[in-house]
Amino acid sequence: MLETIPPQYVWIIVGIAIMSMELFLPGFILCFFGLGAVLTGLLMIFIPLGVNAQLVLFAVLSIVSLVSFRRYAQGYFTGRVSNTNPTGAPMELHTGESAIVTEDIVPNSPRGKVEFNGTSWNADADVEIKKGEKVTIIERHDLTLKVKP
């Protein structure tokens, strides 16, 4: 049955099948090989080619389209954030919550650590605080918590 279908239509059908496989396999690469197959089939409608020329044309078109358009086209398929944070304030506020000092906190020193919600955080304070003391979180700057006794 396959020998009754002209080769240009086989290329187009195979190209559409390859592009449809992109729905099941992530990576956004297969659609360019499918595009190469479809373009090969479309060019064969106008220019008859031998099998070797068809394979070379398919490979060249696929790789050129992959290299040229992947970065540009990938932007259309990435998620967009609809609820942005225009103020730049931290999304999760820990102000007023308690933590335990796990390493002595010395003012303006990167050594201090506290345990908060089961996670170790860098900590800073205006006064020296010893290991084991309970502290209250005043504010958060990136991955450092400002605390007070």
Image (cartoon, rainbow, N blue to C red):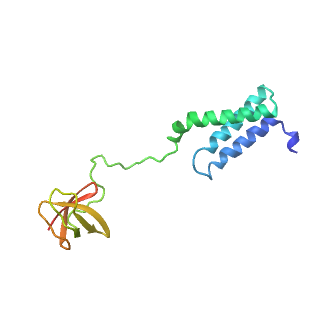
At 37% across and 50% down in the image, what residue appears?
A: 83
At 41% across and 48% down in the image, what residue appears?
A: 81
The answer to whether residue 69 is above or below residue 82 is: above
At 35% across and 48% down in the image, what residue appears?
A: 84
Relative side of 4 to 99, left or right: right
The spot of residue 18 in percent (x, y) is 69, 45
The spot of residue 58 in percent (x, y) is 71, 35
The answer to whether residue 22 is above or below residue 98 is: above
The spot of residue 107 in percent (x, y) is 14, 59
Q: Residue furthest left?
A: 127
At 78% across and 25% down in the image, what residue appears?
A: 47
Q: Which residue occupies the foreground of this view, 121 or 140? A: 121
Where is residue 111, by image quadrant?
bottom left
Where is residue 92, by image quadrant?
bottom left
Where is residue 44, by image quadrant?
top right
Q: Residue furthest bottom?
A: 132
The answer to whether residue 16 is above or below residue 131 is: above
Q: Residue furthest top?
A: 47
Total of numbered circles in the picture?
A: 0
User: The C terminus is located in which quarter?
Assistant: bottom left
Relative side of 85 to 138, left or right: right
User: The N terminus is located in which quarter?
Assistant: top right
The spot of residue 90 in percent (x, y) is 28, 54
